[in-house]
């Protein structure tokens, strides 16, 4: 993954690079670095540290850098451990400095070639081949830009790259191939970054680059060409992102802020998409009307939390729209050689719209001959949003916490909208549409009330803090919600958590139940509640400690071993969305007590742009 940023200006760009890196930290945070062309010596100067951007900032306070031209990087290690040597920027012969996001797949071959040319490698990274290769071509009589282009022609894999060189002082060169990269257009200054959010403090004028674009940034000039050197015209967009949208404000963590933003986020998701108690089909794009015509099945593809949203949708789509629906993790789908169904709508769900496996799975589905595609996505202009035939934006606003929260609930709402549209077309929901739409409208208020459980859940969280394992149970459409609850807990508290369909309990997991194994049950007042209660009694009878999230306390007799968290009356169609909230809060408070880095849990990153 990793985040990259570069700038060329008249002023000192180091503070801009640092601020940008902080805003890119969600992409990786195990080491960070910055390289500049030194104002006085006109040579390269570089600082690299293991750890987060704050650590780089401290180093820069002691050993400052000052320059109008620079590049910087925050890393999520793929090749080589998070060490200072493996941190970017990488430098060749004091002449070329490069930052990289992605993976160079043919790095071994290139490494051998460069070693034969006498280059000595200082890191275990795949990136180091890029920097030496550019240098190699400069020694063959090419200028830096030509050397950059020649290097790109030899790279296989996915990358966004930015580079500087004293041989081309006042230039930042950059490119993308399969990894995101945008240009920021300032007044007499230009920037490059993995994400718009990194540039918002300096400009809102953004150019979204295409794969293969090669940019040459100078203080007062920008050129975008393709690999062959032909000029590419790319429009400037005015970003709607506000600088404070990516700030924490009064909240202790982004995750908490994002949990509390959900009532607003869901209201945004619905905005302008409902008319006369009906979901507007046009919300899926102008061409949705005819693209949805021949749809008789749905194939959902996603990763992580987004995959859980897909699992919930399967229950909705099959029971309400009466269409067969398959859901698969993208990394499996893309290599499984699934049998294509030309009448299956391919739904790719992704917060970032950049997840490598989901993108590749979409391309694979197209190649195989599946039907039209729909991206449910949170980032406009992301690769996924651009690659799909239809797009439904979740409109959750920027999500910074690595553990996804508001993106998930807004994805669910989008999927419920899709279910309604498909059901209407299939003639299976008629009057029910009104009921579902009204329930959707009530969501912001309902979630606001559920957030009041925060204090109660904070107390309950104490009982998890010293545990090593937790079991989550659910049935039916709430089973994937139990899975999402378990994922949240393991991601940020590092407690091993598993989810099971409660009916499976006696086929294995019951053997694990004892006083040290808290069991969390998602137990709404639905048709499966009685069956679930029997499963919970089985846990109770074996001395397990139960934490039951239910509509009403009456579900079971409360005791020291049976804690019931009452959510109140909730419409069945929006119930999976509502039950997500307390589970997010539980994971958050447990992690807080355990003192983990809630927003940046170890070993993870938010945007997984590598396989
Ligand atoms: C990473 C993130 C998860 C996210 C998953 C899929 O694992 O940490 O929060 O659910 O990627 O990301 P996407 O952007 O495709 O939804």
Image: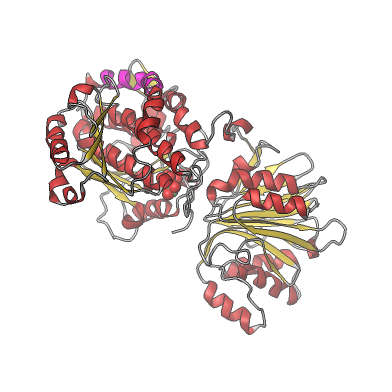
What number of labels is visible? 0
Q: Residue furthest right?
A: 40
Residue 358 point in image, percent of width and height:
40, 51
Q: Per the image, is 438 magenta?
A: yes
23 or 427: nearer the viewer:
23
Q: Name the quadrant containing residue 591.
A: top left
Q: Name the quadrant containing residue 121.
A: bottom right
Quarter of the rendering occupied by the C terminus: bottom left
Residue 509 in sight here: yes
Residue 533 drawn above or below residue 91:
above
Residue 431 drawn above or below residue 378:
above
Residue 413 in sight here: no
216 or 268: nearer the viewer:
268
Q: Name which residue lies at 50% across and 68% down.
A: 105
Residue 412 point in image, percent of width and height:
35, 34
Q: Name the quadrant containing residue 250.
A: top right
Query: Is residue 125 toward the left or the right of residue 300 in the image?
Result: right
Residue 529 point in image, percent of width and height:
16, 30
Q: Residue furthest top?
A: 276
Q: Name which residue lies at 26% across and 22% down.
A: 571
Task: State the predominant SS element of the stretch in magenta.
Answer: helix
Query: Is residue 302 toward the left or the right of residue 259 in the image?
Result: left
Bounds of the magenta segment: 433-449
Residue 444 drawn above or below residue 480:
above
Q: How is the image coloured?
A: secondary structure
Q: Per the image, is 16 magenta?
A: no
Residue 47 point in image, percent of width and height:
71, 59
């Amino acid at each position: 993954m990793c985040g990259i940023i570069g700038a060329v200006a008249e002023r000192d760009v180091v503070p801009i690079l640092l601020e940008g890196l902080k805003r890119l930290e969600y992409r990786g945070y195990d080491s960070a670095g910055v390289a500049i062309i030194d104002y006085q010596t006109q040579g390269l100067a570089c600082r690299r540290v293991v750890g987060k951007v704050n650590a780089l900032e401290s180093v820069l306070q002691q050993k400052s850098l000052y320059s109008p031209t620079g590049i910087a990087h925050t890393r999520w290690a793929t090749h080589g451990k998070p060490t200072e040597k493996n941190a970017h920027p990488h430098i060749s012969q004091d002449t070329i400095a490069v930052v990289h996001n992605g993976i160079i797949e043919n790095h071994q071959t290139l490494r051998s070639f460069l070693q034969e040319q006498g280059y000595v490698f200082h890191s275990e990274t795949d990136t180091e081949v890029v920097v030496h290769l550019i240098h190699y071509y400069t020694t063959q009589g090419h200028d830096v830009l030509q050397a950059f282009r020649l290097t790109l022609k030899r790279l296989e894999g996915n990358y966004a790259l930015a580079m500087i060189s004293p041989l081309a002082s006042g230039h930042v060169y950059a490119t993308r191939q399969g990894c995101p990269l945008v240009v920021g257009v300032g007044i007499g200054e230009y920037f490059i970054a993995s994400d718009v959010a990194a540039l918002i403090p300096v400009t809102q004028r953004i150019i979204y680059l295409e794969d293969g674009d090669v940019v040459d940034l100078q203080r007062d000039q920008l050129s975008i060409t393709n690999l062959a050197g032909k000029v590419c015209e790319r429009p400037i967009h005015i970003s709607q992102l506000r600088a404070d949208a990516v700030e924490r404000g009064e909240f202790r963590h982004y995750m908490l802020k994002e949990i509390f933003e959900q009532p607003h986020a869901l209201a945004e998701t619905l905005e302008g998409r409902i008319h006369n108690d009906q979901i507007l089909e046009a919300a899926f794009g102008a061409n949705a009307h005819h693209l949805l015509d021949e749809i008789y099945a749905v194939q959902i593809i996603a990763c992580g939390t987004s995959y859980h949203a897909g699992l919930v949708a399967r229950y909705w789509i099959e029971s309400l729209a009466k269409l067969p629906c398959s859901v698969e993790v993208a990394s499996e789908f893309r290599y499984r050689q699934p049998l294509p169904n030309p009448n299956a709508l391919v739904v790719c769900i992704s917060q970032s719209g950049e997840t490598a496996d989901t993108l590749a799975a979409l391309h694979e589905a197209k190649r195989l001959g599946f039907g039209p595609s729909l991206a449910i996505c949170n980032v406009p202009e992301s690769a996924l949003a651009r690659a799909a035939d239809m797009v439904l934006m979740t409109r959750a606003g920027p999500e910074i916490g690595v553990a996804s929260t508001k993106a998930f609930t807004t994805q669910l709402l989008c999927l419920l909208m899709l279910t309604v549209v498909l059901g209407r077309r299939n003639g299976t929901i008629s009057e029910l549409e009104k009921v579902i739409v009204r329930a959707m409208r009530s969501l912001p208020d309902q979630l606001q009330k559920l957030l009041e459980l925060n204090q109660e859940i904070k107390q309950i969280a104490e009982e998890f803090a010293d545990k090593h394992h937790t079991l989550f149970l659910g049935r039916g459409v709430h089973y994937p919600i139990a899975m999402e609850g378990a994922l949240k807990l393991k991601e940020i508290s590092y407690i091993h958590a598993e989810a099971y369909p409660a009916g499976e309990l006696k086929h294995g997991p019951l053997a694990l139940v004892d006083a040290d194994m808290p069991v969390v049950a998602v137990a709404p007042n639905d048709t499966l509640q009685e069956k679930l209660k029997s499963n919970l009694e089985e846990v109770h009878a074996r001395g397990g400690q139960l934490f039951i999230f239910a509509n009403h306390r009456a579900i079971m007799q409360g005791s020291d071993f049976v804690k019931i968290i009452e959510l109140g009356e909730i419409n069945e169609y929006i119930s999976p969305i509502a039950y997500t909230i307390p589970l997010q809060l539980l994971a958050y408070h447990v992690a807080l007590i355990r003192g983990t880095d809630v927003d940046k849990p170890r070993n993870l990153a938010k945007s997984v742009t590598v396989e």
